[in-house]
């Protein structure tokens, strides 16, 4: 029976992508619908106003023609037959008292269309919803005062706006018919385009889903375009490269840690097995000494591994206080002179920094132990100031560190000795820990040029109150 889980995952992906496409298409359709609705309303209003303005202009032209006749021939002789008989155009000539002198044939005997009585030379233009002469339609009215040979008169020219209303109604019906069709086209096009745009994303998702913890070599396809999707693909590939590097580093770290732990455990086991087989010739004091040395070595290694694990999680620095580096150096000088047969030379200048005393002491201990392990007969320790930094110099007369290996020595479980001897007690973690502590305090640990041995320099920033002091 086929496993339903892959099919379920595929349908879930389809649902997610379909949901994105639907949401994108719906959002685009809603936005277009709002824009089209606002634009349509504005267009209808402006179109109607333009048509009504045009009809009112025709009424004004009719009024101008009647005014010219009335001014020349008098009100009684004016021809008020409207221009454009197919249009509903009405004309009246009134006396200042409101009496109708002449009017269009269709409204003969009707009262005045308006109550306005402008003086000669003045014009009034207005829109009325209906006329008091029995006309229920909207009209554009032009009223002009004029002087005639018979005295003052008022010319009233009215133009029905029904044509504008009819044209507007046709326009609204056309927009109502085309509006849903256009929205359907927008929705379909948006849905299709969104699918095209998400196709590379789905290809990347399916490729990433196939990458396992044991095989990180696959990479997502990069589209030929130079848009955000291509940038996302390149970013994901760069992330996968970093994951490969991190996974490799983790595997190396676990392998090296296992190797380091196995060696002292093997020594302890061998010592006890030999003592158990040959108890009559076993020197138990020697066995106890060897086992205790290996246990101490195991303890140092476990402490270093715990420190590195905590440092990777939240950084090695835990507290801030004033630390006298010269006091730390004095303690290390005394320890080296008591526990080693090396000549230890010290040059100490009072220097104070802000940091974690225990962590800085640990870094200095790792550096001095490293120098003591590799020195032939001489170790030199110096502390002083250079500019805005406190500087610790640890110098030995051992084989030195080549230029090519100056960064390699700070990697975890790295020894420059190809045989990886552990007789000197090193674990390959001391310098990595020391550099981590230095960087956590805003400083740096590096190998500097030196003839006849190794020279490691630890730099830490001085407090702001001490930066004005001269360099030593």
Image (cartoon, grey):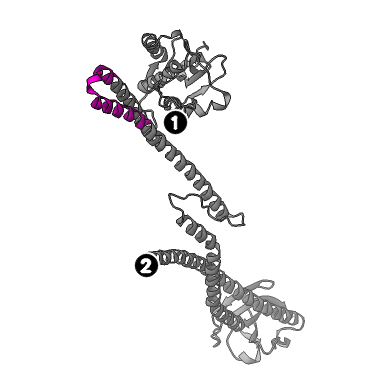
Q: Quadrant of residue 337?
A: top left
Sooner in the amino-acid sequence: mark 2 or mark 1 = 2
Image point (35%, 70%), residue name: 1
User: How far across and how far down the image is residue 225, in percent?
Assistant: 61, 57
Q: Say left or right for 37 vs 333.
A: right
**In this orientation, which residue lies closer to the viewer: 150 or 337?**
337
State which quadrant residue 228 falls in. Answer: bottom right
| In the depicted structure, whether residue 288 falls above or below residue 27 | above
Residue at 43% of width from left, 49% of height from top?
A: 213
The spot of residue 117 in percent (x, y) is: 61, 76
Q: Main secondary structure of the magenta part?
A: helix
In the rendered view, tell whether residue 453 sits above or below residue 229.
Answer: above
Residue nearest the observer in this picture, 311 or 290: 290
Please name whichever residue, 339 or 45, is drawn nearer the observer in this view of the structure: 339
Residue at the spot x=57%, y=24% of the render?
A: 403
Residue, far left: 280
Neighbourhood count class around disc 1 (C-alpha, 10 Å): few under 14, some 14–19, many 20 upward: many
Quote the CA–CA distance across marks 2 and 1: 46 Å
Q: Is residue 114 visible?
A: no
Q: Are marks 2 and 1 in contact (CB under 8 Å)?
A: no
Numbered disc 2: secondary structure = helix
Q: Is residue 96 left or right of residue 184?
A: right
Mark 2 lies on residue = 4
Image coordinates of residue 333 in percent, x first then y, are: 40, 10
Q: Nearer the viewer, residue 104 or 89?
A: 89
Q: Residue at x 63, y 77 (%)?
A: 51
Secondary structure under the numbered disc 1 in the rendered image: loop
Give the answer, above or below, for where 254 lies relative to 464.
below
Per the image, the residue denoted by label 1 is: 412
Does residue 138 belong to the magenta stretch? no
Q: Position of residue 130 (x, y in %)?
A: 54, 82
| Bounds of the magenta segment | 260-289
């Amino acid at each position: 029976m086929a496993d339903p889980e892959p099919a379920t995952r595929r349908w879930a992906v389809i649902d997610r992508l379909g949901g994105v496409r639907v949401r994108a298409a719906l959002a685009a359709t809603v936005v277009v619908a709002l824009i089209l609705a606002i634009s349509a309303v504005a267009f209808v209003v402006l179109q109607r106003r333009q048509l009504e303005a045009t009809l009112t202009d025709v009424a004004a032209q009719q009024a101008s023609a009647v005014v010219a006749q009335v001014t020349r021939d008098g009100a009684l002789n004016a021809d008020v037959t409207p221009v454009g008989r197919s249009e509903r155009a009405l004309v009246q000539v009134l006396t200042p008292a409101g009496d109708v002198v002449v009017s269009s044939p269709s409204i003969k005997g009707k009262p005045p269309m308006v109550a306005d009585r402008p003086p000669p030379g003045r014009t009034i233009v207005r829109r009325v919803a209906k006329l008091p002469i029995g006309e229920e339609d909207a009209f554009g009215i032009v009223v002009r005062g004029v002087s005639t040979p018979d005295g003052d008169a008022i010319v009233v020219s009215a133009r029905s706006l029904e044509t504008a209303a009819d044209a507007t109604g046709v326009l609204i019906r056309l927009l109502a018919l085309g509006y849903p069709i256009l929205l359907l086209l927008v929705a379909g096009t948006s849905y299709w385009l969104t699918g095209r745009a998400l196709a590379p994303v789905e290809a990347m998702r399916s490729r990433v889903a196939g990458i396992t913890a044991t095989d990180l070599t696959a990479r997502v396809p990069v589209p030929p375009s130079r848009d955000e999707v291509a940038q996302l693909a390149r970013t994901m590939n760069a992330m996968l490269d970093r994951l490969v590097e991190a996974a490799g580093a983790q595997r190396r770290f676990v392998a090296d840690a296992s190797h380091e732990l196995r060696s002292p455990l093997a020594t302890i086991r061998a010592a006890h097995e030999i003592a158990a087989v040959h108890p009559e010739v076993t020197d138990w004091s020697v066995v106890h000494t060897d086992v205790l040395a290996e246990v101490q070595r195991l303890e140092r290694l476990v402490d270093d591994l715990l420190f590195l694990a905590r440092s990777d999680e939240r950084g090695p620095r835990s507290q801030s206080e004033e630390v006298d580096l010269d006091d730390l150096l004095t303690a290390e000088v005394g320890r080296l002179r008591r526990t080693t047969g090396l000549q230890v030379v010290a040059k100490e200048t009072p220097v104070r920094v802000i940091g974690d005393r225990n962590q800085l002491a640990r870094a200095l201990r790792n550096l001095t132990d490293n120098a003591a392990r590799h020195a032939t007969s001489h170790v030199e320790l110096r502390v002083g100031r250079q500019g805005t930094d406190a500087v610790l110099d640890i110098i030995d007369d051992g084989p030195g560190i080549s230029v090519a290996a100056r960064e390699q020595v700070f990697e975890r479980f790295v020894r420059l000795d190809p045989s990886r001897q552990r007789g000197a007690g090193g674990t390959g973690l001391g310098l990595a820990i020391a550099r981590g502590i230095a960087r956590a305090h805003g400083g740096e640990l590096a190998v500097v040029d030196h003839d006849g041995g190794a020279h490691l320099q630890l730099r830490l920033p001085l407090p702001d109150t001490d930066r004005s002091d001269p360099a030593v």
